[in-house]
Amino acid sequence: MNGSKLGVLFVTSEAYPLVKTGGLGDVSYALPNALRELGVDVRLLLPGYPAVLEQLSLVEVHEDIRLSPLQEPIRLLAGTMPGGMTPVYVIECPSLYQRDGGPYQDNAGKDWPDNALRFGILSKVAAKFCNHSFLFKPLIVHCNDWQTGLVPAFLTFNPNPRARTVISVHNMAYQGLFGPEVVELFGLPTESFSMFGLEFHSKASFLKAGLYYSTWITTVSPSYAKDIQTPDYGCGLDGLLTERQKELTGILNGIDTTAWNPETDPYLSRHYNTKSLPVKVRNTQALRTKLWLPPAKQAPLIGMITRLTEQKGIDLLLPIIPDIIKTGTQLAILGSGDEELEKSLQDLAKRYPKHISVTIGYNEELAHQIEAGANMFLMPSEFEPCGLNQMYSMRYGTLPIVRRTGGLGDTVVDATPDNIQNQVATGFVFEEKDSDELLACVQRAIRTFRDKTTWRQLQINAMSRDFSWHKSAQQYVSLYHQLLD
């Protein structure tokens, strides 16, 4: 469906390559680009973090904007996202956004104490766009996660004609909970602080505000849309989501097939495609050399790029690492998170230096090299709203090992005998949150790896899947038109 003359303000707290902490950053770059290719006039709104101001060429388009409860005026700047396709508006407010550390936490990993104000103001500026006299007037305001959850609330209680609002939930586990005083602080009516509003266990929930007041709710995979309507994954908001199930859609994330392309990836030692798959081994050799892992031609290398949290299944992996190593298999892990989990993995790397490499932090170059150099990619998540790495992995012929949850179950086809015979298998899937079941799945993948003919067919199946944003963007355009109609 064509999106011409459809104005969309895409409000987000991060966007690759300017600032990124996870999948939201990738989505906030790739989806607007895909929407513009379909004719949608989509424009981003971002906070003016130092990394954003440093990387963009910006001009002032509105000065001296005064929004309560902020004491100082703010400026609105405009530019274009890297790649030259998507316009972006940036909120310049030094006291809120220009500081050392990340977008949500300081350098010690603690949440900024004024996050309610920082992202409440982001939401207020987004709502201001819907006034007749303010710059670009969108028909749709597309919000993302709790950081933008107050936008639908502000517009609901705004007497001016308002845009339709969509809120995309990328992870229900992060809800933006603050004291009830924020309701009065931002000038929301007292009746909004109730179970029929943004109140959640005596706190003000930015995410609940978005879920309750938005015109429509989307999440990042069809299975996750079902999962969050259950007590196990709804994080206390499953009742509200069940009530709103007719206005809830799961649209599978795509991936940036330009940035993640083994034929052109600038970070790789050798480029390859389905017709030159033997070349992939050169990237495996280069990765082993870089990570100080010895050559092991007959043993697979398993990659993992993740937040080191229980949600990502690290607690399932730790007890079985010695069993995996007994097969000769090596592990290349990149990530950061829980200090105890970081230490446990680092201790194992010291104990098994020929089999495990652990890099704490995030490194974009190494992430690409792991995707290309690994033979398998591990994602044993407790829950996974969508997941992008399993799609990156398939594109690189690196077969994913995943737990059937959320988007992982929507994207990876298990290598059962029937699926192998029908040439649709693209990876290995296990069901329960259980270390023994994870180990059995890894062992099944290792056995299959030794059957070179079958393994090559699985790689071709995986690399042939289309995970581009085009299909997903078409679904969003269709949804936007549905809301306006």
Image: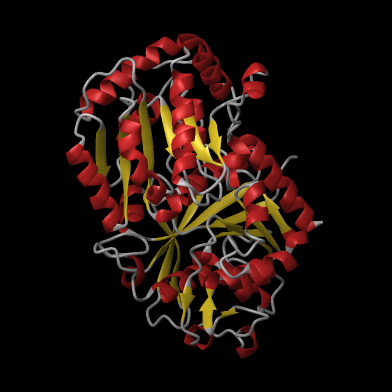
252 relative to 152, above or below: above
Residue 182 at x, y percent in the picture: 49, 83
Lateral position of residue 8 relative to residue 286, left or right:
right
Residue 12 at x, y percent in the picture: 50, 58
Image quadrant occupied by the C terminus: bottom right
**Is residue 339 or residue 272 the one in the foreground?**
339
104 relative to 416, above or below: below
Residue 315 at x, y percent in the picture: 38, 51
What is the basis of the colouring in this image?
secondary structure
Lateral position of residue 473 relative to residue 400, left or right:
right
Number of dots carrying numbers? 0
155 relative to 191, above or below: above
Q: Using the rendered image of the protein, determine whether residue 403 is visible from the camera's viewpoint.
A: yes
Residue at 51% across, 68% down: 175
8 relative to 215, above or below: above
Residue found at the very far right of the displayed protein: 485
Residue at 38% across, 54% down: 309
Image quadrant occupied by the N terminus: top right
**Is residue 327 or residue 45 the one in the foreground?**
327
Residue at 62% across, 52% down: 224
Query: Residue 152 occupies which quadrant of the picture?
Result: bottom right
**Is residue 345 or residue 135 the one in the foreground?**
345
Lateral position of residue 280 relative to residue 294, left or right:
right
Query: Residue 35 occupies which quadrant of the picture?
Result: top right
Residue 104 at x, y percent in the picture: 37, 64
Residue at 34% across, 69% down: 111
Q: Using the rendered image of the protein, determine whether residue 256 is visible from the camera's viewpoint.
A: no
**Is residue 260 or residue 397 the one in the foreground?**
397
